[in-house]
């Protein structure tokens, strides 16, 4: 540690598969370390908050999914110092767990495996999860690796203290430090529009100390810090390194993940801009030609919109497109419903309310409003709406094959035949293909089938039967009849 720097609290990001308990774990930590009285009614989407363990502070960043985490890193912002990979012990490694591992490896930060839901799991579950992790080149300490593994239950709040102690230990080993004296710089964690104060941004200070009155700027906007509040909504005069600072004063919405720094003058901050801030640009998503799902998207904060844009980009577009008619922050209004109505669109509401007038207007005009609080579920919902626009394809499904043992009678286009089902089943009225020496030579239909003297609807495998066949092609002894049925299936995107 140099003379200019000293230790700062570690910044921790929590990642994992949907429904494996990321949010529950964050809530358990919050509830254990921050009383309701102290929290001042912390909202669901704080962006970041701090706790204390053994006299050491820890900052947790709460991103709306892996996509936001990627967005921050893609702009070169070093967001987290330590990661927590949450895995439900009773379910093990899933698709999004693998994605989270990829994010953590690309970030190059140390991380801890938190085996969650231990109230539902047992030792066998834990071993299975650890083995699955080893297949992803993640070796926990009990498997000869260096990745710590802590068993927790967010529901019962067990293992939380051990997890926090492990974070403190790793932070000490990593020697996380910063210069407290230099002008502040850091990362935009979250941003939204406050009806009374305008643009409100949560900034994570990484170096220096942010003070009230500082002129700050990002690549797209600038402003003077009018106020600083911590995650408990308490006013601060200054925010040292690793502090999540809720600020007001920026002229426009900065992008999540952008780096900010303090400037001497507004002119310097203005001249340093390289792009315009504001709303997330969905313009490349709009294509009015061809089949497409038309969407109006409303979200709680700008970071959520950016995360939504990133996941929508990954959906296949070869057969059905996505047109984002409009997007914005805040509750769903009558204007959103009118916009959706004009283009026969649907409304996605992510972690926001729908005002009563908009609800009634949507009901009257039969406009669908889908409410989500998990980005993964939103993505799957959009995928389903896209699949509804795909035309069903008619396919042939083979039901059984019969070998012709004897030809009893041939009369023009009809024949009475004897045969045996060699696989599957044969049903009355079924269309059939005639197979001779592995080649299809014609098609026909089974008008009737008999078992002995009795008419039946179907003959199972390995049983002999009589049949009345109708078709242009004459069937010979030794030929095969392949029975099938046509059905319509919805193709995948």
Image: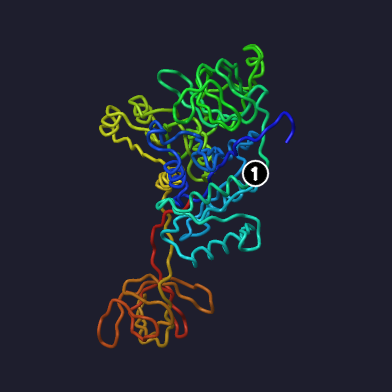
Quarter of the image with the N terminus is: top right
Colouring mode (rainbow / by chain / secondary structure / one colour): rainbow
Q: Which residue is at 36% across, 29% downward? A: 332
Q: Quadrant of residue 275?
A: top right
Image position of 467 with respect to 261: above or below: below
10 Å neighbourhood of mark 1: few (<14), some, or many (≥20)? Answer: some
x and y, in percent, of residue 427 in the image: 33, 75
Q: Residue at x 47, y 31 (%)?
A: 231
The answer to whether any part of residue 326 appears in the image is: no
Residue at (55%, 42%) from the top-left corner? 13
Instruction: Name the residue nearer the viewer: 52 or 414.
Output: 52
Relative horizontal placement of residue 238, taking residue 41 as reference (left or right): right
The residue lying furthest to the right in this view is 2
Q: Classify 427 as above or below 453.
A: above
Residue 417 coordinates in the image, percent (x, y): 37, 83
Please provide percent x and percent y for residue 117. Answer: 44, 56
In the image, 148 versus 460, the foreground residue is 148
Q: Looking at the picture, does residue 384 appear above or below residue 358? A: below
Q: Mark 1 = which residue?
A: 172
Number of on-image labels: 1
Seen from this angle, which residue lies furthest front? 55
Front residue of this view, candidates 453 and 339: 339
257 to the left or right of 448 = right
Q: Quadrant of residue 358?
A: top left
Label 1: which secondary element? helix
Position of 250 with respect to 174 (left or right) is left
Q: Does residue 311 appear in the picture of this structure?
A: yes
Q: Position of residue 211 (x, y in %)?
A: 57, 20
């Amino acid at each position: 540690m140099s003379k200019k720097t000293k230790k700062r609290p570690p910044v921790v990001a929590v990642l994992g598969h949907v429904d494996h308990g990321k949010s529950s774990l964050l809530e358990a930590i919050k509830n254990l370390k921050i009383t309701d009285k102290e929290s001042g009614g912390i909202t669901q989407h704080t962006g970041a908050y701090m706790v204390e363990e053994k006299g050491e502070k820890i900052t947790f960043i709460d991103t709306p999914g892996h996509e936001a985490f990627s967005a921050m890193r893609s702009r070169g912002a070093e967001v987290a110092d330590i990661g927590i990979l949450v895995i439900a012990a009773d379910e093990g490694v899933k698709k999004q767990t693998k994605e989270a591992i990829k994010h953590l490896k690309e970030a190059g930060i140390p991380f801890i495996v938190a085996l969650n839901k231990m109230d539902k799991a047992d030792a066998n579950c834990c071993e299975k999860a650890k083995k699955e992790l080893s297949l992803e080149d993640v070796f926990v300490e009990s498997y000869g690796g260096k990745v710590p593994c802590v068993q927790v239950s967010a529901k019962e709040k067990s293992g939380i203290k051990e997890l926090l102690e492990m974070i403190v230990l790793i932070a000490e080993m990593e020697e996380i430090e910063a210069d407290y004296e230099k002008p502040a710089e850091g990362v935009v964690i979250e941003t939204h529009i406050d009806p009374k104060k305008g643009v409100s941004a949560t900034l994570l200070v990484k170096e220096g100390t942010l003070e009230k009155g500082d002129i700050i700027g990002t690549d797209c906007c600038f402003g003077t810090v009018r106020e600083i509040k911590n995650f408990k909504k308490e006013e601060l005069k200054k925010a040292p390194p690793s502090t999540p600072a809720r600020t007001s004063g920026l002229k426009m919405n900065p992008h999540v993940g952008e780096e900010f720094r303090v400037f001497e003058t507004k002119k310097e901050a203005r001249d340093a801009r390289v792009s315009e801030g504001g709303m997330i640009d969905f313009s490349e998503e709009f294509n009015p030609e061809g089949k497409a799902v038309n969407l109006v998207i409303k979200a709680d904060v700008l970071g959520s919109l950016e995360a939504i844009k990133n996941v929508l980009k990954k959906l296949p577009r070869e057969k059905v497109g996505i047109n984002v008619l409009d997007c914005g922050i805040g509750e769903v209004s009558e204007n959103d419903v009118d916009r959706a109505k004009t283009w026969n669109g649907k409304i996605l509401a992510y972690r926001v309310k729908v005002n009563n007038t908009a609800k009634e207007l949507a009901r009257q005009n039969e406009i669908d409003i889908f409410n989500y609080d998990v980005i993964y579920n939103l993505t799957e919902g959009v995928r389903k709406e896209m699949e509804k626009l795909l035309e069903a394809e008619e396919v042939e499904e083979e039901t059984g094959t019969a070998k012709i043992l004897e030809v009893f009678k041939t009369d023009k286009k009809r024949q009475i035949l004897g045969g045996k089902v060699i696989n599957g089943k044969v049903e009355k009225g079924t269309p059939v293909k005639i197979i001779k020496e592995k080649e299809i030579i014609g098609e026909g239909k089974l008008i009737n089938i008999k078992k002995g003297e009795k008419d039946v609807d179907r003959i199972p495998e390995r049983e002999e039967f009589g049949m009345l066949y109708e078709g242009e092609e004459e069937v010979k002894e030794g030929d095969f009849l392949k029975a099938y049925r046509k059905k319509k299936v919805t193709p995948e995107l």
